[in-house]
Image (cartoon, coloured by chain):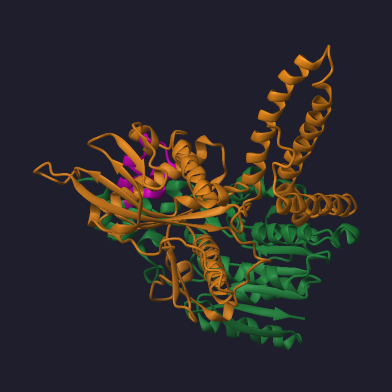
Chain colours: A green, B orange
Amino acid sequence: MSRLAKLTAALGAQQAQAELRWMLRELKAEAVDDAVKLRSQGYPLQYILGTQPFGGLDIICKPGALIPRWETEEWCLKLSKSLNPLENNKVLDMCTGTGCVLFLLLHELHNMNKSNRASIKTNSIFTGIGIDNSDAALDVSRQNLNQLPALEPLRSRIELLNHDIHKPLPASALSSTVVTANPPYIYSLNEADSSVSEHEPRNALLHQPRIYEDLVHRTLETSATKAVFEVGYLNQIDTCVDIFHKHKWRAWGEKDSNDNWRTVWAEK
Amino acid sequence: MFRNYALTKAMTSKLSSLESEYKTISNEFNDNYSIDLEKKLARIRPIITKYNEYKNTETEISELKSLTLDPELGNEAKKELSDSSENLKKLEQEIKYLLIPKSENYESSCMIEIRPGIGGSEAQLFASDLLKMYQNFCSNKKWAHETLVSSYNTTGGLIEANILIKEPSSFGYFQHEAGVHRVQRIPATEVKGRVHTSTAAVVVLPEISEEEFTIDMRELRFDVMRASGSGGQHVNTTESAVRVVHLPTNTIVTCQDERSQHQNKARALKVLQTRLAERDRLEKQLKTQQARTSQVNTTDRSDRIRTYNYPQNRITDHRSNVSLHHLSEVMEGGLKLSEIIESVDSALKNAYQG
């Protein structure tokens, strides 16, 4: 069976061609056969190619961390546009995984800042801190931080820490102004595609009790005035909105462009 | 025998007005740098340089003339005089060329679009050959380029491709590549060994910056491949194709070449912007009754501009009537292609001069 036929059987003609093209473009010629074999067995393309484009960044992907999704990219870019690049923003990203959310926000702020001449005078400083309780995920986010050329000017301003979000935040996170998270939210792995449940890290997918409650409480510990969390279900939005409202924040849910409930937004 | 006024009065007055324009812009440019002024200067500079040379030669000639009666230097002067007047004639020709109005956007970078025409899968194959030819040609010229869109049908045939060439004046360079390119060869699938004729259409558009032409995002519809179901962490989709529809004109651009929807969307928008700007420009041109012979939009066999004949290993341009026997080198994007491109440019210039 030819490479294309193998991929076509697994992915359909159109997608098989696109993916084979990407493999030929990005992999060494001798690696393509194995790549096709793995891919036709459902192994994620991003682990095979090693990256996933996310906004203007090519995020390094390894089995220790969740592969960035287009839905996350979508809200992340939207959030970056709502931030003022001339202010001293400090982003706290919980359950950071590959670090994609944190890195893209700071990358966008950096670009907006560069293209805005006024910033030369105001000299705004923005920094970031990413936390995760998985060492495997932190390995991937550190690789991204150290290896992505686009992050070079930001490297010294970003901190990555192993921390459990069920516990109070480390001191350095308390001065954050914006809080984000894409926590594990799937209730049962049967609901996920097999390519996801079999190959991506369980602890990045499977919902844990009180996770959204704790994300909101962590946010309230900081000096943040804005927060965005990704969700998988409407009731997860309700959980967050209720607590935010009790603390006199404005909070609401938003859908992604595929009409699924995807994020909860909150502003103080 | 020695002409003092080689250039017509109209030309000299045009030249002196260009001189003063050049001075004014240079002064402005020194105080206030702008890309726009730089472009204007770059356009006038070669003319001014040649005109100065021309005036110097003229002075030289009148000095030499006054010496022709000198008993000692007379013969020497006559000799030099004939050299100088040759030179003057040459400069006169060059200035005339330079004064021919350049097409609008001559200095712009450009986009080359390629689509298969008549000839089914053989035409699709030829279109991808042309794509490769232009890509490699730009690489060989060391011109930055990227392929914004290349879409294929399910059998792997090229439906449409679009290369952005980030080189100043590449529009001026490639503009006459627009038209129907014809290929004559035996397709790989042809069992009886017959030569088939197929075509591909090439369109060349000037690159437009966002400041020059903006699209109202409310007039766009984006279609993307969306998995049904909960999305998010539940699925890991790698389908990234994006289709942008400009609703008022029903212009459609599809991009599936990149790995993320975000990238494909950006590329599709760039292509859409260039096409709409060109459409806008043509409309304006029609309104002002200045419609020039524009680029071919059909893939009709009759408006072919060039033939790639494989059995004879020959490439012929039908405007300059220049033929080359380096077909495979040209198809690989070798710099031989520039001989053809430049032959067309001078053929069209000569036609303009009459």
Q: Which of B184 and A18 lies nearest the eye of the viewer?
A: B184
Q: Pick the residue in front: A138 or B278.
A: B278
Residue A183 visible somewhere in the drawing:
no
Question: Toward which corner of the image does residue A230 lie, by quadrant?
Answer: bottom right
Q: Determine whether A118 is above or below B248 in the image.
A: above
Q: Would residue A60 appear left or right of B72 to someone viewing this image?
A: left
Q: Position of residue A248 (x, y in %)?
A: 76, 87
Whole-percent x, y for residue B122 in the image: 24, 51
> Looking at the rendering, which quadrant does residue A56 occupy?
bottom right
Question: Which quadrant of the figure contains the C terminus of chain A?
Answer: bottom right
x, y percentage for residue A7? 28, 53
Q: Residue B304: give x, y in percent of width and height.
A: 34, 53
Type of secondary structure dominating the magenta stretch: helix
Residue interval drawn in magenta: A21-39
User: Residue A144 or B61: which is nearer the viewer?
Assistant: B61
Q: Does residue B123 appear to the left or right of A29 in the view shown?
A: left
Q: Is residue A24 magenta?
A: yes
Left or right: B263 in relation to B15: left
